[in-house]
Image: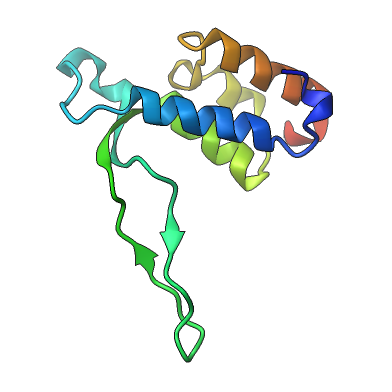
Amino acid sequence: MDAVTDPDGRAIVALLDQAIHAEARTDAPPEAEQRDWLYGGVDPTTYTEPDAHGWMGIVPPSTVGWVPRALVFWHTVLASGGSISREQMRQPAHSLSRWPTIEIAVGDYLTASPWLIA
């Protein structure tokens, strides 16, 4: 995937979303690996329609389980359009080495979007 053809990162976010769903598990990972996983909703947060006063509620996730911390981290950073520090990028917990295709896509995207690196 060439990041230049995906200026806002939507395709990479979709790729991350697919990987999160593929990797999600209902059983807890082995204790030695649990720091690399997060427990919670697998689906992205969705909201109810606004009520008469404009208030919206969070819809409970349809799927709950364990998901890889690195995929959730990168999904959150890229989906929010936020910036990331080089220190955060070097954190072992944020490594995408288990997913080489995604690692390359994110690297290419960050190279083409240097303003995202704080």
Location of the N terminus by quadrant is top right
Q: Is residue 56 above or below residue 19?
A: below
Q: Is residue 113 visible?
A: no
Q: Is residue 108 above or below residue 52?
A: above
Tell whether 111 sits left or right of 59.
right
Q: Is residue 93 above or below residue 78?
A: above
Q: Residue at x 60, y 42 (%)?
A: 79
Q: Position of residue 57 (x, y in %)?
A: 39, 71
Q: Position of residue 39 (x, y in %)?
A: 26, 37
Q: Residue at x 74, y 24 (%)?
A: 109
Q: Is residue 56 visible?
A: yes
Q: How is the image coloured?
A: rainbow
Tell whether 65 sits left or right of 10.
left
Q: Position of residue 23 (x, y in %)?
A: 35, 23
Location of the C terminus by quadrant is top right
Quarter of the view holding residue 108 = top right
Comparing 82 with 98, the one in front is 98
The number of discs equals 0
Q: Which residue is outermost to the bottom?
A: 52
Q: Is residue 83 above or below residue 27?
A: below
Quarter of the view holding residue 24 = top left
Q: Residue at x 77, y 31 (%)?
A: 6
Comparing 90 with 27, the one in front is 27
Comparing 20 with 68, the one in front is 20
Q: Position of residue 87 (x, y in %)?
A: 60, 24
Q: Residue at x 29, y 23 (%)?
A: 35
Comparing 17 with 38, the one in front is 17
